[in-house]
Amino acid sequence: MKIVQVTLRHLQMEMKSPFTTSFGTFQTKEFILLEAVDEQGTIGYGESVAFSAPWYNEETMKTNWHMLEDFLIPLILGKDLQHPDEVSEVFAPIRKNNMAKSTIEGAVWDIYAQQTNQSLAQALGGNKTAIDVGISIGIQNSVEELVEVVRGYVEEGYKRIKVKIKPGWDVVVMRTLREAFPTVAIMADANSAYSLKDVELLQQLDQFDLTMIEQPLASDDIVDHASLQKQLSTAICLDESIHSLEDARKAVELGSTQIINIKIGRVGGLTEAKKIHDYCMEKGIPVWCGGMLEAGIGRAHNVALTTLPNFSLPGDTAGSSRYWEKDIISPEVVVEDGVIHVPQQAGIGYELNIEAVEEYTVMKKTYNLE
Ligand code: OSB
Ligand code: MG
């Protein structure tokens, strides 16, 4: 493979309903869609999961555009690549900026899968033909509304319900949910809203038989999570704190996490995601695929990654219609009885819906191999 052209598009899509976390509310999703063309004319797509503002991590859509335009695209254009694993080596001189790197790497994996006539899932080594899915539900205006929203998704068949928590929206909320849904797999995601001062409050969550609590403490911490885990019976799952295989190894060795949420963008791409998956499998640490409110291309990559065997817990990759009136792929990602059927065609297995893409495009720029 040799990438000879890259096109970046700034897309803007309205969400069907606002999504609120402990750090802020999403209503409009702005992101970069990347198209890479290799010398044989094969086209691959990548989606940046960086948001408009640096709330979840330090990257933004604009910092990703800058990194791509000024550093990453110049590094990748014209490089001879035998395998997508080499992309992270090409990008190794650039520190961090994982979501920007992952945007190109995803497109190269897509091209590689097409040229080797495999589905992206197969190219990654995945073997499932259907994946179990859960759903992540934002903070609502009242606990009563939350119960009704959860009820709708439980009836749709989602296999695990994750709810966002924050100080003041935690113990009472989880108690009400557990009473309303005694047998549903429920978990909480704090997005770093607590500190070790809150141990007693977090211990109260132990009584609700939660599958796990996701990222209760600081986004850059693995030390305090280890002491918290010693004081909780509920399993801690790290999200924000894990950016690499090395981070995963350290967190597991310290006892900071019993489960890991893998997000492709956060760890710099599918190659690193697979390494973390393999390491966790060896250590008996289950993983699941997190979500970043992706549009169709990012969602398709999540579906493919989730086919690896140690993705043994339902992830956050819900159906397209949970987020969008009209997604940018055809067919859209559909959830039936709590599963997504994995496409078997070569590549990501979903076509880009170019009319939808044009409708959502705010700006577009093409970079060619000189
Ligand atoms: O922490 O997993 C998170 C959404 C935005 C930012 C961070 C997170 C989330 C979600 C939603 O939980 C997952 C999804 O439905 O894509
Ligand atoms: Mg999370």
Image (cartoon, rainbow, N blue to C red):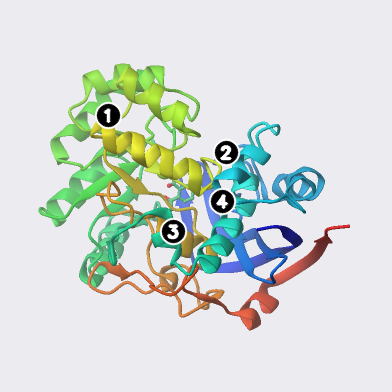
- CA separation, marks 4 and 2? 29 Å
- CA separation, marks 2 and 1? 24 Å
Residue type at numbered disc 4:
His
Per the image, the residue denoted by label 3 is 123
Q: Residue at 19% of width from left, 49% of height from top? A: 176
Q: Residue at 28% of width from left, 50% of height from top? A: 309
Q: Nearer the viewer, residue 151 or 270?
A: 270
Quarter of the figure with the N terminus: bottom right
Q: Give residue 25's position: percent from left, percent from top.
A: 53, 52
**Mark 3 neighbour class, 10 Å CA radius: few under 14, some 14 to 19, many 20 or more:** some
**Mark 4 neighbour class, 10 Å CA radius: few under 14, some 14 to 19, many 20 or more:** few
Per the image, the residue denoted by label 4 is 83
Cβ–Cβ below 8 Å for labels 2 and 1?
no
* Image quarter of residue 71: top right
Question: What secondary structure is marked by label 2?
Answer: loop
- CA separation, marks 3 and 2? 29 Å
Q: Left of 263 or right of it: where is 51?
A: right
* Nearer-N-terminus badge (3/2): 2
Of all residues, the one furthest to the right in this rendering is: 370
**Mark 1 neighbour class, 10 Å CA radius: few under 14, some 14 to 19, many 20 or more:** many
Quarter of the figure with the C terminus: bottom right
* Nearer-N-terminus badge (3/4): 4
Q: Nearer the viewer, mark 2 or mark 1?
A: 2
For residue 57, the mark is 2
Question: What secondary structure is marked by label 3?
Answer: helix
